[in-house]
Image (cartoon, helix red, strand yellow):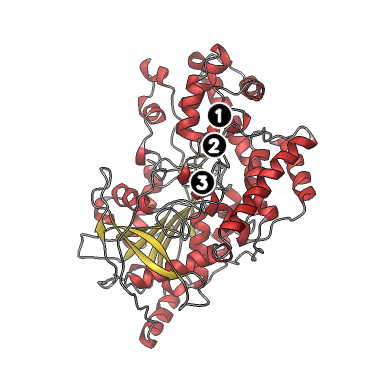
Amino acid sequence: MDRRTAHTAALLAAGAVVGSLAVALPSAATNATNATNAANPTNAATRPQPRQSDALAWRSCATKAYPRLECSQVPVPLDHARPGGRKITIALSRVRHTDPAFQGPLLVNPGGPGASGLHLAGYVATSLPAKVSAQYDVIGFDPRGVGASTPALTCRPGHFAPVRPDPVPRTVSDESAQLARARAFARECGRKYPDLLPHLSTVNAAKDMDLIRAALGAERISYFGYSYGTYLGAVYARQFPHRVRRAVLDSVVDPDGVWYEDNLGQDLAFDSRHKAFAAWVARHHATYRLGTDPAGVEAAWYTMREALRRAPAGGKVGPGELEDTFLPGGYDNRYWPRLADAFAAYALHGRTQPLLDAYRALGAVDSKGENGYSVYTAVECHDAPWPRSWPAWRADNTAIHAKAPFFTWSNAWYNAPCAFWPVASLGPVDVANTALPPVLLFQATDDAATPFEGAVTMHRKLHGSRLVVERGGGNHGISLSGNACLDRYLTDYLATGALPPAVPGDAADAFCAARPEPEPPAAQAAGEDKSSGREGTQMTGGALHGLHGLGIPGRGV
């Protein structure tokens, strides 16, 4: 499900050695306090956290962007049913609090499954108002199997090497070639990691989070998760409701669709976002010269796709790679100017270099992306049942492709290893919860990676939660992205526990207007709105944090 991220593309190595760690069970007095907090969630959310001491060895892992970042690691059981058995490690990062009014740890997760969260701690700590972040230890982590955690999975190196077969199967032979790739990936995962795959799941990642909490010496944690991280947070809260102090879920997974149905829903939503991109290009015909009719612009894009099927650009960009390159535009419209430049250069002048450059920046998969995809499949294929009959996949995706051709088959083949996965699937978690303090949810109405209906479902399942909606927004990961209205709700909640008033019977409790769409660079030069256009061409590092999925083409939630 979840897709590409700029600021998590570079993983941060964390190699600190941690001594033996004793995890204490909560005392009777702690349980009594938790019961009181559950009965009075507002009181629980606003009471300051006591000072904590953790048993972890922290070392500096500073970067230019995040000079206060520290790293450590914590051992956890591979099998939580056998806590004395084999251990694996979870890599951690931290930006430490500086305010004596300490509110405890704030665990952050960027989504995936399979995305590294180490740099996200630095991003959140520097993006929140200083007076708020100073009151928290902002804690990032690489979930089991990811990045600097050990062991880290890479099932089949080169699985995304270009040029891949056209995702849209035109013949039985085309379909057979794609099925062979999917089977090979599943087979290699099972061959290389037979001991790990049965223990890679959202439930186990949530149990790891609670051992992180214990290692930090905290009775309760606050949590801030994007995309897939919203489901991880909800699963954690279901297992450990008395351990949650505050929780923010941004761009919310539909917990009732995990994961096959959610992926089918994405296909329709990403096609709509691709049409929105075409309409934007048409509105800027003066810059891109691709026509003023959105349908005509979209048709020109599919003409480009067909030409690349016959002759891949630079021997690297065929139709699959093209979809990988343009999919980030479905996550965040700040990519649109760069994508439109590459589109126009090829469609009007036959120039391939801008397209190749965009592919290398936005669509190509490196070793870190291969790790992310390996964890993605291991978690999603294990989390919940997938059809084991390929004809069922064929029928569903053929029907949806007829309505939504942009992404459907690409997404199908991305997830197809789940049809052949060597480990039996679990059942999805019922995340309904009445024992939590109030949770704050954020959602854009036109988000493609996690469509709006999922946030409404989660809102209804989490008793007392509040849903803040970005009306007309289509980006993914919307808080701390420059929308001051959204960020006021976020910072008020993290600072004091304050929430917007509940609106009984409504799908949402508060609304914010979406940020303006980007402007092309030529429009900036002509003296038009420069603020939004500048972001469209200068997204580097943490500037575009909205895509909290994998650093690989087209995947994750």
Q: First in sequence, mark 3 or 2: give its number.
A: 2
Circle 3 sits on which residue? Answer: 370
Q: Residues within 10 Å of mark 1 (few under 14, many from 20)?
A: many
Instruction: Name, please, the residue furthest toward the top.
Output: 349
Name the amino acid type tagged 2.
Answer: Gly
Q: Are marks 2 and 1 in contact (CB under 8 Å)?
A: yes
Circle 2 sits on which residue? Answer: 330
Q: Which mark is residue 277?
A: 1
Percent from the top left, x then y, of residue 58?
Answer: 26, 62
Q: Answer whether residue 117 is visible to the viewer in this image.
A: yes
Above-or-below relation of 448 to 24:
above
Q: Which residue is painted at 40% across and 82% down in the image?
A: 25
Q: First in sequence, mark 3 or 1: give its number.
A: 1
Q: Which residue is painted at 48% across and 66% down in the image?
A: 206
Above-or-below relation of 132 to 180:
below
> Of circles 3 and 2, which is in front?
3
Q: First in sequence, mark 2 or 1: give its number.
A: 1
Q: Which mark is residue 219?
A: none
SS state under label 1? helix
Give the alpha-carbon distance from disc 3 to disc 1, as whole Å.
Answer: 28 Å
Percent from the top left, x then y, of residue 207?
Answer: 48, 69
438 to the left or right of 318:
left
Residue situated in front as seen by the camera: 484 or 94? 94
Quarter of the rendering containing residue 432: bottom right
